[in-house]
Amino acid sequence: MLDASAPAPAKSAFMWFKEIYSTCLLVFCSVVVITTMFQMNTTLSTQSGWIALGIFLISLYWLSMVEGGQASLVGLPPVDQNMYKESHPMAFRIMSTIKEGDCLDRYLMGRQFLVLALVFVENLCAHAIDPEKKILGMPLIVNKMFIDTGLGVFFMTAMIGKISAQVNASRCMLDYVNNYFAYFTMQVARIIEVSGLLHCCYPVQMIFAKLSGQPLVSKEAPRTTGQNVFFWLRVLISTAILMFSFAVTLSALFNGQTTMWAGVPEWLTVVLFFSFMSVVGMLEGMQIAFFAVAQMRKEDLEVSPWAKKTVNVLFAKEGRNIPAFMIGRQMCVTLCFFIIARVTTVKLKDNDDNIFGVSVGAQKFFETGLLGALITTIVASIAWQLVASAFPLAFLSTPLTYVLLQFCLGLEWTGLCQGSWVIARIHRKLVKFKRDEVYIGTAEERKAQAQADPKSFDEDDERETQVVPGHLYPGPATTPQVAFIPLTRSNSDLNEIEHDLKEKREQMKRMQMDDDEEVDC
């Protein structure tokens, strides 16, 4: 019934230590950040700490749905929908929409901006106006370490809003998106894409697909003349908005009109802006490239020494470095997002004129940081993913890729965000999530059933998990079984699945008894 792989060793003392100290760190950061809000010392708490806290918690919860929803929506397409049509009607409804034409690509594009926008809103909620204001009488070093640097809100976002959500969604894809909020989030991401805000990415998609020598594959019919006019009009508008966003942001950077740390010269601020965007781009592209190379032959990988060296590290330890990289990468990307938010969020000095002489309302909009979020989404995220999907081997053939891989693995090893698993377990228990195996079996079981019954549609469509040039496939939060060496399950994993299966059998037995009683009556 379960994976035949041998169970992994029980959790070590070092792992317990990492979970405990990381959870304590998360609690401490939460206290520090929330206290700062109630001191009315953040950008959005000047009127009320409750307003800032409310916006922050909504953003954090919404971010968890965006991140968890992605893990579910990119993991479920290979599974036949009829297997969960009755048990998970809302998940079925969501996937029916996602599997229409190129909807998954559009969702992923809109979702990318939604993530950045929510992170920038959290930064507004938690960014201290006066970093010297003491918190609960603690020494100022606490302010410097957790508030002024942004590490406090970073740990809250990484552990609560991102990693824990992906951990649960990667194991409980069906339960995670079987609700109206997941449907709402999916539709918001689609609306963002339909608006044309990110349409300047599509010419980039076309260019790199062509350069790769492979046609840009679409699941939809060619656009009509009217659709083409509307499409390219949105491309032009999107390009103009991106250029204007750069103009405003660079003007603010060169004039020292952002929330960047005091004492950092303007030229260095600009250098840091592009440097951190490049790091984010590399990490976003590496994820795509790593999934793409899993489909390549060993001989292809040996063309480049750096690519071979990188892949050898990635697939070491029976594939355990892959999820470790994913966690370290998520930590690094999230930290870079907050630094970019700090660098690009506009804040005028006293007596400064509005940028480009715009109205007060327009200046207030500039100060939301959404222009920086748009730039980061397009230039530091989507564009790099498209390049990596077209040229994965070239992307891995650089020493920087190897260095970033090792850095992410080292970051994960520290256990700084190990508390994510504690949060994930608490969340899973509270909402009673069950693993997908309870409802649809394992991938191996679905394959065996399909082979036994030629008319069965239970076998997974592995084409749905392949990286295609010019398309955004981020991969699930953990190792996809169709692409990599299967990971051994831990004893706790096996016990949890057995417990869920037992509950499911007892529930079905009770339902059968109730039906029998109704028949007798």
Image (cartoon, rainbow, N blue to C red):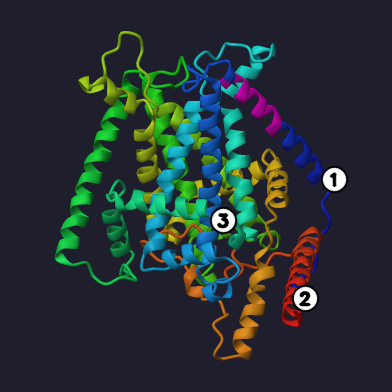
Is residue 328 visible in this depiction of the protein? yes
Q: Nearer the viewer, mark 2 or mark 1?
A: 2
Pointer 3 or 2: first along the chain? 3
Residue drawn at (36%, 25%) of the image: 367
The residue where tag 1 is placed is: 13
Say which amino acid is labelled 3: Thr
Identify residue for label 2: 513
Q: Amino acid at mark 2?
A: Met
Question: Which amino acid type is shown beneath numbered disc 1?
Answer: Ala
Crowding near pointer 3: few (<14 within 10 Å), some, many (20+)?
Answer: many
- State left or right for residue 182 relative to residue 451: left
Q: Is residue 108 left or right of residue 314?
A: left
Q: Which residue is mark 3?
A: 310
Magenta segment's dominant SS is helix
* Magenta highlight on residue 29: yes
Q: Which numbered disc, 1 or 3, marks the residue that appears first in the sequence?
A: 1
Closer to the camera, 26 or 391?
26
